[in-house]
Amino acid sequence: MDSVLVNFVYAPQVGHAIEALHYALGYHAADPSRRIGVVLNANTPAELATWCPFIDEVHTIDLDLFDPATDARAQLAEIGKDWDHVVADARSAQPAQRDFFPGLAAYYDQADAYFPGAKGFAGFNKAPSYEPRQPLRLDLPRSERTGFTVLLGGSADRHMYPTVASWELILSALAERLPGTEFRLLGKLAKDGRTSTTYSRDEYERLAAAVPGARLALDLPLRDQLCLVGASKVFLSPHTGFGMAALATGTPWLCLSGNRWPEFYFNDGVPFYSVLPDRSRFPCYTMVNPEPEPVEDEGPRTPSMSAARIRADLPELLDAATLLAGGGLDYATALAGHRDRLARCWGGDRSMMWSIDNVLAGD
């Protein structure tokens, strides 16, 4: 029996685990008889892989991404060498990534020396065979979809997310547009070594008191969070890796796009809508380059999350929310629309339209 190990140790955010699971599914789809394993950062919620029946083994590596003296050889020895193919995160070979994360570079050099099987990079359609663009769905309980789940922001610095006043504007407008809608406000405030939300409990409570239909859902286990998302009509947030996990529950993601990274994961069959900022007015998508100059909005704030940007794009966000909540947008239409809006956002520069499995290519 053929075997593939998806060696995908990277930063601990949830979205990187979803990347690994997506690639594992592609290798399984190409040959369902395969034994499939994944290796993740120990601070990543590796339990996600246990909700994927096509994955046979889950391993984790505890390391300091920034420590060039990282030594993971003892942990690697616990995985075993009997893999026909070992496919790594392609970032492990990129000079800029290796320079920025010397501990990660050390780990991948040790892994390369340890595993005797054929080496490659995850998601490339070479040996081992890989079937791209598979629909990833986490094996979690299903229930009738109602309301919205909302994540105010991810784990980045607080100035990279909207103020509570901006969120009150957004959610109050949604409550007026869609009367009777319930909004479950997700958040992880506990500091446990994993990523957590940078909003405070006081901010959540202030917002819940101000918005009709808002209820708090804080510090729930990941499984419970994702079950709530899977039972909602729409998941709403800025760019966050948790949005990729939301897509894996089958729930549409309405993204207030901006900050460093554009959305790059589009899970087959799940509608989505990214509200893209006017980059000439609200600079963003700097990726590994320095952030744009902040603007004043209850203190310094990244331009694409500022009150001015929120007000500018609120009509589009409301229309997109109405469309997604009503089931009026299918995946193919969502993808085509996003491709067109992204091309305009980048002024026709298609080199910036990258995505997992190259789904934005349009073929």
Image (cartoon, rainbow, N blue to C red):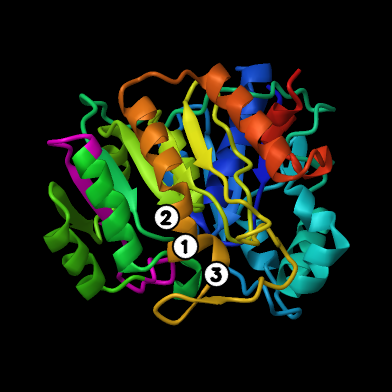
Identify the residue at horizontal 64%, vertical 24% (top origin).
Answer: 133
Taking the image as shown, residue 103 lies to the left or right of residue 116, namely: left
Residue 36 makes an appearance in the image: no
| Kind of element beneath mark 2 | helix
Circle 2 residues within 10 Å: few <14, some 14–19, many ≥20:
few
Circle 2 is placed at which residue position?
Answer: 311
Is there CB contact under 8 Å for labels 3 and 1?
Answer: no
Circle 3 is placed at which residue position?
Answer: 302
Identify the residue at horizontal 30%, vertical 71% (top origin).
Answer: 190
Viewport quadrant of the C terminus: top right
Residue 63 higher or lower than 67, as above or below: above
Is there CB contact under 8 Å for labels 1 and 2?
Answer: yes
| Residue ranking furthest to the right | 95
Taking the image as shown, residue 286 lies to the left or right of residue 137, namely: right
Viewport quadrant of the N terminus: top right
Q: Amino acid at mark 1?
A: Ala
Circle 1 is placed at which residue position?
Answer: 308
Residue 9 makes an appearance in the image: yes
Span highlighted in magenta in the image: 177-198
Circle 3 residues within 10 Å: few <14, some 14–19, many ≥20:
many
| Kind of element beneath mark 1 | helix
* Magenta span includes 189: yes
Q: Amino acid at mark 3?
A: Thr
